[in-house]
Amino acid sequence: MRRIRFVPQADAEVAAETRYYRREAGPEIASQFVKAVEQASCLAAEFPAAGSPSHANTRRIQLKKFPFSLIYQLAEDEIVVFAVAHNARKPGYWESRTTRN
């Protein structure tokens, strides 16, 4: 299994959405969101080709039960996560992140 590295912006997205779910829906839903991110990350690390091809030479795995996708790319020996992106907000906003990592 490959190592997973979240770029700082992706880490910030997970933290912000976790806070949102905790505030709006409660700690149980927030915990489920974090678990969904972890499951998608593990799937990408174990099976890098599992995600659907996406923009900027990345792949996308839909989170279970949440309207978000894990956007990642296979690097030499790791999986780089560029975004945990909402499926209906600002498509492709994260693409510039792929050229800096």
Image (cartoon, grey):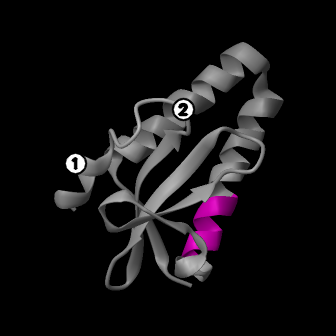
Mark toward the start of the polypeptide (1 vs 2): 2
Residue in the picture at 53% in, 79% down: 48
Residue kind at label 1, given as amino acid type: Ser
Q: Which residues are magenta?
A: 39-45
Does residue 61 appear left or right of residue 83 in this picture?
right
Query: Residue 44: within the magenta?
Result: yes
Does residue 15 appear left or right of residue 77 in this picture?
right
- Residue farthest to the left, as pictured: 100
- Residue farthest to the top, as pictured: 24
Residue in the picture at 49% in, 81% down: 2
| Picture coordinates of residue 13, whole percent (x, y) | 46, 36
Residue 1, labelled with which disc? none
Against 59, residue 68 (above or below) is above
| Picture coordinates of residue 31, whole percent (x, y) | 74, 39
Against 30, residue 51 (above or below) is below
The majority secondary structure of the magenta stretch comes to: helix
**Under tag 1, what secondary structure?**
helix
Rounded to the nearest angstrom, the CA distance separating label 1 from label 2 is: 18 Å
Query: Residue 77: within the magenta?
Result: no
Residue kind at label 2, given as amino acid type: Ala
Quadrant of residue 41 within the rendered picture = bottom right
Residue 96, labelled with which disc? 1
Q: Are marks 1 and 2 in contact (CB under 8 Å)?
A: no
| Picture coordinates of residue 27, whole percent (x, y) | 77, 27
Residue in the picture at 69% in, 23% down: 22
Q: Nearer the viewer, residue 98 or 92?
A: 92
Question: To which residue does mark 2 refer?
Answer: 88
| Picture coordinates of residue 16, whole percent (x, y) | 50, 28
Quarter the C terminus occupies: bottom left
Q: Nearer the viewer, residue 80 or 87?
A: 87
